[in-house]
Image: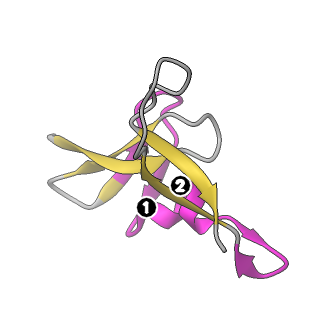
Amino acid sequence: MSWEITDHACRYCFGRVLRSTDDGIFRCAECGKEAEETHERLCWCGAEVGGERAFKCMRNPNRTAKTPQEVIVREVD
């Protein structure tokens, strides 16, 4: 099975989410949790507060020594 790195972070451990190139399975590279069909079942993009989407995963636009992560999670405006 082959995997692609996505721009999403696992909502359980903040690990990087991978996507299978074979069958559309999404898997956390750190904790191993899996989801089918969409990354939103595994990453922060699918987390809701009060029935509304509350967060989004995104590439870190300003990587520094203090925040070296490639993917970060932000609140949705």
Q: Which mark is residue 42?
A: 2
Q: Is residue 70 left or right of residue 34?
A: left
Q: Nearer the viewer, residue 6 or 60?
A: 60
Choose top left, top right, bottom left or bottom right for residue 5: top left
In the displayed structure, 61 sits above or below 32; it is: below
Placement of the C terminus among the 4 image quadrants: bottom right
Residue 13 placement (x, y as % from top left): 62, 34
Q: Residue at x 62, y 47 (%)?
A: 11
Q: Residues within 10 Å of mark 1 (few under 14, many from 20)?
A: many
- Does the stretch in magenta take in 64? no
Residue named by callout 1: 39
Choose top left, top right, bottom left or bottom right for residue 36: bottom left
Q: Are marks 1 and 2 in contact (CB under 8 Å)?
A: yes
Q: Is residue 52 left or right of residue 57?
A: right
Q: Residue at x 43, y 42 (%)?
A: 71
Mark 2: which amino acid? Leu
Q: Nearer the viewer, residue 64 or 25?
A: 64
Q: Residues within 10 Å of mark 2 (few under 14, many from 20)?
A: many
Q: Residue at x 55, y 64 (%)?
A: 45
Give the residues in magenta.
26-53
Q: Which mark is residue 53?
A: none
Placement of the N terminus among the 4 image quadrants: top left
- In this view, the residue farthest toward the top is 65
Mark 1: which amino acid? His
